Image: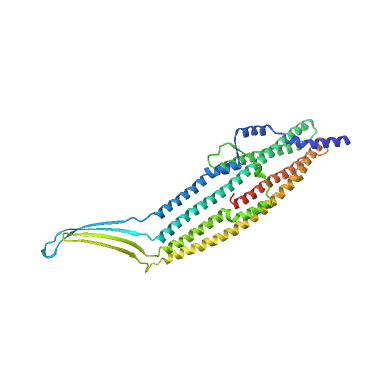
């Protein structure tokens, strides 16, 4: 009995090692991965900044706003008027002939209105740039999510390949036992079902991985190779601590893209108020004219003044002031939301980190050892196939929970990075 127990223990310790041996499918996948172009997260993010369609569209908006500055700096054109006519004297007196009126008008632009108009155009450029930063922050967050989704699916594919290899080994063993009459046919049916489930799980994970890669390439742009692999770097998995959180909290006011955008929109609204107020000031146009007829030449020099007696632009000024109030409230709301999002993301990160550490700290190894013991007991006839499959199922649940916890950890970190615009 002692010899049998010792054999069971030795097989239990050896079983996990056998289950982790690479299958022919995994070897082929590894060879394909070696020939495909590999990208790190940093390379994908930097490439997306330069070559993403979303970023290019946002930068085109910056060019549009910059053109508005040239429009605001343009000066009014002079006005030239030529009015030829025919002069006819009354009562048949002499003096018939041609008459010509030539006049020139030069609008004198209000310097305060011009300055405020240019400043309003410059604030529009600041808004466009802040919007580009916000778009890039959302794009980077989406890339990080897809990147670590691929990491999760690759871990799932490797795990399901391990499951399929193990279930196929069990299936072949049970088939032999059924032929020799050592096991009932029910065990064979159960093993075939487990093998079919393992194969289906593997195929689904492989398809989801392809879909995630297509989504990632859609976000980054066409510069990414159609067939590619990803590569993790040590910095991608470095755990965050309280010092990192304090750095995030200190940087949120100056680095949060949405706060920066709201601040730029408030500045733009304030510039609009100044522009509308300066537009109330009188507008001056200098005029010079010369009128010629057969008997005399008349020269005139004067000025035309538009007085704001009726329309004092009270409506546009009130609209601009209301927009300032809206922009200020939006900035306050965004500051509150960013602070709350940072706290929530940090709590989610800490919870996911504790979960990962607890699973990696012994739970997963305990479940793996249980599978090995159950397999060894099944080989020696001390346990049935149901007990072994149940132990294997429990191990899969723990392993899948660990994969999910690692992904949740990266999602929480992505939220933290997005909030501070990194």
From the viewer's perspective, is 367 left or right of 236?
Answer: right
From the viewer's perspective, is 303 left or right of 142?
Answer: left
Q: Residue furthest right?
A: 1
Confirm whether residue 211 shows in the render. no
Q: Is residue 207 above or below residue 100?
A: above
Name the residue at 65% across, 47% down: 410
Confirm whether residue 271 shows in the render. yes
Location of residue 285 (image quadrant): bottom left
- Residue in front for this viewpoint, 101 or 37: 101
From the viewer's perspective, is 169 left or right of 85?
Answer: right
- Residue in front for this viewpoint, 399 or 319: 319
Rendering coords of residue 316 (x, y %): 43, 64
Rendering coords of residue 381 (x, y %): 82, 36
Name the residue at 55% across, 48% down: 136
From the viewer's perspective, is 234 left or right of 69?
Answer: right
Q: Residue furthest bottom?
A: 309
Rendering coords of residue 229 (x, y %): 61, 38
Q: Is residue 130 above or below residue 215?
A: below
> Total marks drawn?
0
Q: Is residue 345 above or below residue 25?
A: below
Name the residue at 65% across, 54% down: 246
Quadrant (top left/top right/bottom left/bottom right) for the N terminus: top right
Rendering coords of residue 204 (x, y %): 64, 40
Location of residue 372 (image quadrant): top right
Q: Residue furthest left?
A: 92
């Amino acid at each position: 009995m002692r010899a049998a127990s010792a054999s069971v223990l030795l097989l239990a310790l050896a079983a996990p090692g056998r289950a982790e041996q690479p299958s022919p499918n995994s070897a082929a996948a590894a060879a394909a991965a070696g020939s495909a172009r590999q990208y790190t997260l940093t390379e994908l993010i930097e490439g997306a900044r330069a070559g993403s369609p979303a970023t290019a569209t946002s930068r085109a908006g910056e060019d549009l706003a910059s053109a508005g500055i040239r429009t605001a700096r343009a000066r009014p054109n002079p006005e030239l008027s030529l009015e030829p006519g025919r002069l006819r004297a009354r009562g048949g007196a002499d003096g018939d002939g041609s008459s010509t009126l030539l006049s020139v008008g030069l609008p004198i632009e209000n310097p305060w209105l011009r300055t405020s108009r240019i400043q309003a155009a410059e604030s529009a450029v600041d808004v466009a740039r802040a919007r580009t930063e916000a778009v890039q922050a959302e794009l980077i967050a989406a890339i990080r999510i897809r990147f670590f989704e691929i990491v999760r699916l690759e871990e799932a594919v490797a795990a399901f390949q391990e499951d399929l290899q193990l279930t196929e080994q069990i299936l072949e063993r049970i088939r032999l036992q059924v032929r020799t009459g050592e096991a009932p046919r029910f065990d064979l049916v159960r093993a075939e079902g487990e093998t079919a489930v393992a194969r289906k799980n593997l195929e689904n994970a492989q398809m989801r991985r392809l879909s995630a890669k297509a989504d990632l390439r859609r976000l980054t742009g066409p510069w990414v190779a159609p067939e590619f692999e990803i590569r993790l770097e040590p910095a991608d998995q470095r755990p965050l601590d309280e010092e990192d959180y304090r750095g995030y909290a200190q940087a949120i006011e100056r680095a949060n893209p949405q706060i920066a955008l709201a601040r730029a929109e408030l500045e733009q609204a304030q510039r609009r108020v100044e522009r509308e107020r300066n537009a109330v000031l009188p507008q001056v146009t200098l005029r010079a004219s010369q009128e010629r007829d057969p008997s005399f030449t008349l020269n005139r020099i004067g000025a035309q003044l538009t007085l704001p007696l009726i329309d004092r632009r009270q409506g546009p000024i009130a609209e601009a002031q209301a927009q300032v109030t809206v922009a200020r409230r939006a900035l306050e709301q965004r500051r509150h939301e960013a602070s709350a999002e940072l706290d929530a993301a940090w709590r989610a990160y800490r919870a996911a980190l504790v979960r990962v550490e607890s699973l990696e700290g012994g739970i997963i190894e305990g479940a793996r050892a249980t599978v090995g013991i159950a397999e060894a007991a099944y080989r020696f006839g001390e346990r049935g196939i149901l007990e072994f499959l149940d132990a294997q199922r429990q191990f899969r649940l723990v392993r899948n929970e660990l994969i999910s916890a690692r992904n949740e950890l990266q999602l929480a970190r992505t939220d933290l990075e997005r909030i501070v615009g990194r």
